[in-house]
Image (tube, rainbow, N blue to C red):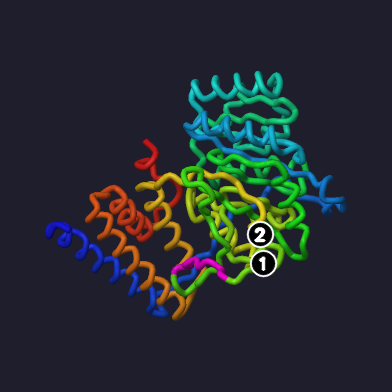
Amino acid sequence: METSHYFIIFPMYYKITTYFCSLIIPKNIKRHAIQIHKINRYKLTAAIVAVVNNRDVHIVIINYNSEASTISCLDSVLSNINDFSQITLIDNEATPDSIETLSRWIEQNIGTLSAVPKEVIEASSADAIIEQKSGSTGKLLYLPMSQNLGFTGASNVGINIALTYKSDYVFLLNNDTTVQAGLLSDLLETITREKVAAVSPALVSRQSTNERVNYPTEIDRCRGFRGRSIKKSQSDDIYYVDFLSGAALLLDTDVLNEVGLFREDFFLYTDDLDMSLRIKDAGYELCYDNSVTVEHDSSPRGSLSTYYGTRNRLILITEYLSGLCRISSLVWYLSTQLIHICYWISQKSHMKAFGAVEGVIDFMSGYRGKNPKYHE
């Protein structure tokens, strides 16, 4: 590493450390109430008692400047899954090109787009949806948005729509995934276990055959919510875990009605960790189903992920933890991030390093939500 970089990093690290030391003094510790995007319009009635194959599943897929991936994902869903009630496709910050491409594909492969039902518009972000460009085939809702709502905001739009239809479950699926036959039926069988609120399949890298992207994970709260892979096998390839990835996640809508939706001040990244923590703290179980897989794009991440990941992880540490656990978590996380920053600089990955540093600075300043700098 060049000597000049040390003069930039370490004075900044000293200031950051000083700031966090102030957090450990009891009289200065202020617990922040967790801001959760609550369901405020529709509330589910009693759960429908039915056999697994008759459960109502609403699939939510989000597009953002990646129409080819979205179409591939949709094609795999329509070809391999038939046990769902509806798909909601949310086109974040839709462009004329994305609207034309996706609308044409839907009309050619699913059916003619007609006006979206009024109750769907009401359940959406009314100030963001481009109503005249939205459409419905009955099996699929296409909702182009004038704004980029991030993963959290767009997911909440889809979940609220699922709640208007009183769906039993909502299945969040990244648009850079492809699915296999039998996926939902297997996940539905798992989620009907006692106290299970959410289940996720194993994610397999598209770039490396059979390489796992996610693992059954337990969380160490006193080390910055560090995840550790569960080594000991559990029965039937079903693992009871502390964390589930939001890339392919089946959620019980009754539980969502209780614990709330995704935090929109997170915008991207770590939102699934927050959701996992809230579900576990409410007394429910999370399951990782290793018997089913979803193919997922595991391309390397850049400054976008380091910025939001760093900022949002620090929010979780200061809001969920207290006392010695908070202290040890902050020390551990900041120390490991400093090591990462130095490594990225030595590898000429200056933007990743800058993203992490800015994530810490924005956390300290109270900046939340979307940072336009990373979405230009």
Q: Is residue 174 left or right of residue 353?
A: right
Residue at the extreme front: 209
Front in this rendered view, residue 197 or 161: 197
97 versus 257 height, above or below: above
The disc, 1 or 2, on the residue closer to the chain's N-terminal end is 2
Number of other residues with Cα within 10 Å of mark 2, as a class: few under 14, some 14 to 19, many 20 or more: some
* Callout 2 secondary element: helix
Quadrant of residue 259 in the image?
A: bottom right
Can you identify the residue that label 2 sits on? 259
Identify the residue at horizontal 50%, vertical 68% (top origin).
228
* Residue type at tag 2: Val
On-image quarter of the N terminus = bottom left
Q: Are marks 1 and 2 in contact (CB under 8 Å)?
A: yes
x and y percent of residue 287 in the render?
66, 61
Based on the picture, tell me whether residue 225 belongs to the magenta stretch: yes
Identify the residue at horizontal 74%, vertical 65% (top origin).
195
333 versus 294 height, above or below: below
On-image quarter of the C terminus = top left
Identify the residue at horizontal 55%, vertical 65% (top origin).
217
Cα separation, mark 1 vs mark 2, equals: 7 Å
